[in-house]
Amino acid sequence: MKSLLTVSLYFFISAFLFSCAFAPVNTQFEKAGTLKKNNVELAGSFTSYYIVGDGYAKTNNNIGFRVGYGISDRFDLKLRYERLMMGSDAKSDDIYDGEFKGVNYISVVPKIAIVPKKLSFLVPVSHYSYKVDMDSVKSKVSLNSVAPQLIYTFTNAKNKFDFSIGLKADCFFGDDGAGMLLGATIGAGFSSDLNKWALRPEIGVTNLTYGCFLSYGLGLQLMIPKKKQTKSK
């Protein structure tokens, strides 16, 4: 288990990403449909990430929150935060010589409908940051990413179920260089009315040189419609 994690991390680090055993955020818990003008979205999620090659190891668990606003019927703007917490297998690996508590992830997510309700284009602009204490020396590390992605969604006629496929290219850059990872997600939405709320399970994969990151999680999405103006008599 440790050899898999250490070898895989070597190639992960060589791509100028994290200097720790964390998988980057891949899941979206999204559909192609936009919020529509002046509507608000509130969402939360939990995700587990694994690194897979000759075996597998758990790298991190994420807790996330998101708020979105419909700028127009075809354009949303969202703000997302996730806390990446070390997984059980990463904790047991001997690459950790110091105190390490986790990673903060914050992302601004513009979303544009190409084909309303069916196909959308997202460009999350994100920032990762964390602190590490090695031999009583504390340091701060940060990393940025831009991740253009497409989401296609099929929705049933009763608007109670949808199925989405997402493709992304995650471009990382920081003081130590730049790199890119390709990812994909498959998700679904279950609800009595998808315009009001949805429970969203999702699985994802991020390609590495030798192996991949796998993720699975569950999100809850709530839509708050704009207040209707009352006509004055």
Image (tube, rainbow, N blue to C red):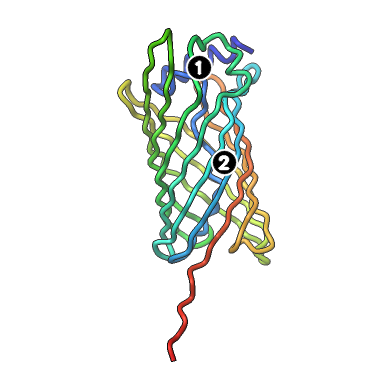
Which residue is farthest left? 175
Residue 161 x %, y %? 67, 57
Which residue is farthest bottom? 233
Q: Earlier in the sequence, mark 1 or mark 2?
A: 1
Q: Quadrant of residue 137?
A: top left
Question: Which residue is the site of mark 1?
Answer: 9
Residue 140 x %, y %? 37, 22
Q: How many numbered badges does the structure rendering display? A: 2
- Amino acid type assigned to the residue bearing label 2 in the image: Thr
**SS under mark 2:** strand
Residue depicted at 42% across the width and 39% down the height: 106
Residue depicted at 56% across the width and 24% down the height: 86
Which residue is farthest front? 136
**Is disc 1 surrounded by few (<14), some (14 to 19) or many (20+) residues within 10 Å?**
many
- Left or right of 148 on screen, residue 102: right
Q: Which mark is residue 183?
A: none
Q: CA distance from mark 1 to mark 2?
A: 22 Å
Q: Which mark is residue 185?
A: 2
Residue 74 x %, y %? 43, 62
Q: Quadrant of residue 70?
A: bottom left
Q: Quadrant of residue 58?
A: top right
Q: Is residue 226 above or below residue 22?
A: below
Residue depicted at 60% across the width and 24% down the height: 87
Residue 97 x %, y %? 49, 9
Residue depicted at 69% across the width and 62% down the height: 192
- Amino acid type assigned to the residue bearing label 1 in the image: Leu
